[in-house]
Image: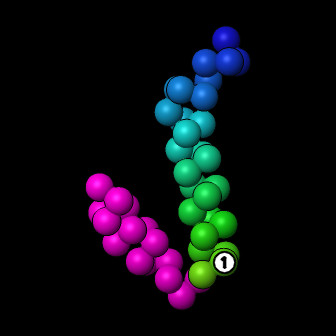
């Protein structure tokens, strides 16, 4: 069952939040741009 926890959504959210946290730590002054503008550009 653990193998399928990746696709549960909750772990994916945790991974995304961890990635965003790393981005914030690297570029704290670009926090809002990373949170809003970047995902819209990727779509």
Give the residues drawn in magenta, as a range.
28-43
Residue 11 percent coordinates (x, y)? 60, 36
12 w.r.t. 26: above or below: above
- Res. 36 in view: no
Name the residue at 67% across, 76% down.
Answer: 25
Query: Does 39 lie within the magenta span?
Result: yes
Label 1 secondary element = helix
Residue toward you, 43 or 4 = 43
* Furthest residue in direction right, as rendered: 2
Q: Main secondary structure of the magenta part?
A: helix
Residue toward you, 21 or 37 = 37
16 w.r.t. 21: above or below: above
Query: Does 30 lie within the magenta span?
Result: yes
Residue marked by disc 1: 26
Name the residue at 59% across, 83% down.
Answer: 28
Residue 10 percent coordinates (x, y)? 54, 36
- Res. 8 in view: yes
Q: Is residue 30 left or right of residue 42?
A: right
Residue 3 percent coordinates (x, y)? 68, 18
**Image quarter of the C terminus:** bottom left
**Image quarter of the N terminus:** top right
Q: Is residue 28 left or right of residue 30?
A: right
Q: Which color scheme is applied? A: rainbow
Name the residue at 60% across, 28% down.
Answer: 6
* Furthest residue in direction top, as rendered: 1
Residue 5 percent coordinates (x, y)? 62, 23
* Furthest residue in direction bottom, as rendered: 29
Question: Dot 1: few (<14), some (14–19), or many (≥20) neighbours within 10 Å?
Answer: few
């Amino acid at each position: 069952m653990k193998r399928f926890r990746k696709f549960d959504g909750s772990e994916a959210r945790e991974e995304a939040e961890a990635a965003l946290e790393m981005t914030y730590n690297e570029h704290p002054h670009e926090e809002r741009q990373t949170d809003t503008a970047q995902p819209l550009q990727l779509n």
